[in-house]
Image (spheres, grey):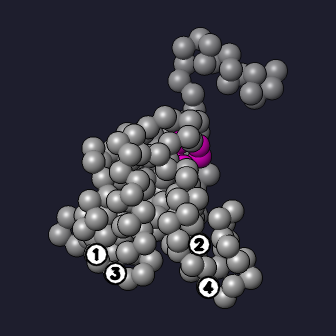
Amino acid sequence: MSASDTDAMRRSQGEPAPHSAITLNVNDQVRRLEVDPRTSLLDALREQLRMSGTKKGCDHGQCGACTVLINGRRVNSCLTLAVMHEDDEIMTIEGLGDPDHLGPVQRAFVERDGFQCGYCTPGQICSAVGMLAEVAAGWPSHATADVSAPRITMTDDEIRERMSGNICRCAAYPNIVAAIRDSAEGGPG
């Protein structure tokens, strides 16, 4: 009998799955925890580390509410396992700023009223921070007018295309786009 067969038999008999000890670097803090190897990063953040800023929306990678930054790249934390990120730098909305010291994108969202109910806002902001880094690195999108240009022009269409993985049920999109444009241009916020 293989090890996976043994594990499956134990689980079918009501025995808990074996846990893995992992160390995560979240918001520049090393955190140690024990997780079922099947635990999503989203669930580890919310349920074990009690970081409720990252939201569980669809739990299928379709809404973007759970977006975090991993090594500077935006990732839907509901679609990745916590055990896969031991050597990575994970940044959540809590790591981008706090109410007394907002980050630039957070300030722009407040200035432009880029939220209504606010549920999608942490994912929107994390995605915007990652997206602005992609633009700074010169990564084109499907909406980039001139992929050979030395600098990408941040048009509203460019921002909408790049943020298309983040859904706002309240439809605050015009204000979200304005906040991101301000952040990209160093304007209000």
Count of marks placed on residues:
4
Front-most of residues 108 and 68: 108
Residue 151 lies, with reference to residue 72, above or below; the image says below
Is-magenta flag for residue 78? yes
Callouts 1 and 3 close, C-beta under 8 Å: yes
Crowd class of label 4 (few under 14; some 14 to 19; many from 20; radius 10 Å): some
Going by the numbered disc 3, the residue's amino acid type is: Gly
Tell me the distance, in whole angstroms, between the alpha carbons under discs 3 and 4: 18 Å
Residue most extreme to the bottom = 150
Q: Which residue is mark 4?
A: 151
What percent of the width, then of the height, locates residue 154? Answer: 53, 74
Callouts 1 and 2 close, C-beta under 8 Å: no
Magenta span of residues: 76-80
User: Which mark sits nearer the N-terminus, 3 or 4?
Assistant: 4
Q: Which residue is mark 3?
A: 187
Crowd class of label 2 (few under 14; some 14 to 19; many from 20; radius 10 Å): some
